[in-house]
Amino acid sequence: MKRLVARLWRLIRGPLQWRILWLAHAKFMVGVTGVVRDDAGQVLLLKHRMWPPDRPWGLPTGYAVKGEEFPLTIVREVKEETGLDVKPGRLVSLNSGYRLRVEVAYEALHTGGELKIDGFEILEAQWFSVDSLPEGMQDSHRRLIEDTSS
C-alpha cells in the first residue's frame, strides 16, 4: 500500500500535490511583532484599544497577509498603526504551539515618517527607555524588549 501511495504521489507532481498538502495540514495565522527602536535606543510602544484593559501596552504587531514576507509585515503594520517608517532587522523570536497561530518577532529601526496614530486600533504611541517601560504591558513583549536590549 505504501508503495502504491508513493507511486501515485510521484505521478501527481505540481499544483495538485500542493492542494492535497494544503487540505491535509493545519492552517495558521502568523502574528508578527516588531521591537522598534529609535536612534537613542528607545522602544516604540502602543496602547492598543482592543487588548485587555489591564494590559493595553505593547509592541506594534499584526497578522501577515497571504504572500507577505514577515519582515515586511512589521513595516506595513507600523506604518498603518503609527505613520512611522521602519527598517526590519534580525529575527528575534519564533513561537509555535498555539492552536491557530504562530508568532514571529523582529527587531526594527525607526527611519522616519510622521507620528499619526490609527485611532481605531491604537489609543496612544510613545517612545520608552528600557528602564521605564509602562505598567499594563504584555509580559511577552516586555521579555522581547529585555532579551533584545544590549
Image (cartoon, rainbow, N blue to C red):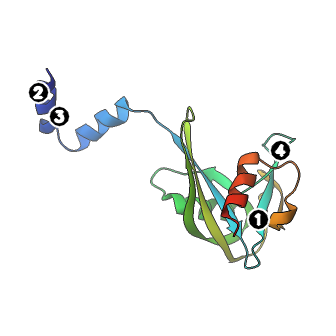
Q: Secondary structure beneath disc 4?
A: loop
- In primary-sequence order, the first of circles 2 and 1 is 2
Q: State which mark lies toward you, 3 or 4.
A: 4
Q: Position of residue 63 (x, y in %)?
A: 59, 49
Earlier along the polypeptide chain: callout 3 or callout 1?
3
- Alpha-carbon distance for marks 2 and 1? 56 Å
Circle 4 is placed at which residue position? 55
Q: CA distance from mark 4 to mark 1?
A: 16 Å
In the rendered structure, the answer to whether residue 32 lies left or right of residue 127 reads left
Say which of marks 2 and 3 sits in front. 2
Mark 1 belongs to which amino acid?
A: Leu
- Marks 2 and 3 sit apart, C-alpha to C-alpha, by 10 Å
Counting residues from the N terminus, which is met first, the one under dot 4 or under dot 1?
A: 1
Q: Are marks 4 and 1 in contact (CB under 8 Å)?
A: no
Residue underneath mark 1: 44
Q: Quick check: marks 2 and 1 in contact, CB under 8 Å?
A: no
Q: Nearer the viewer, residue 90 or 126?
A: 90
User: In the picture, which quadrant includes the C terminus?
Assistant: bottom right
At a point 87% along the width and 41% down the height, the residue shown is 54
Q: Dot 3, crowdedness within 10 Å: few (<14), some or many (≥20)?
A: few
The residue to which callout 2 is attached is: 3
The amino acid at mark 2 is Arg
Q: At which x and y percent is residue 30?
A: 54, 46
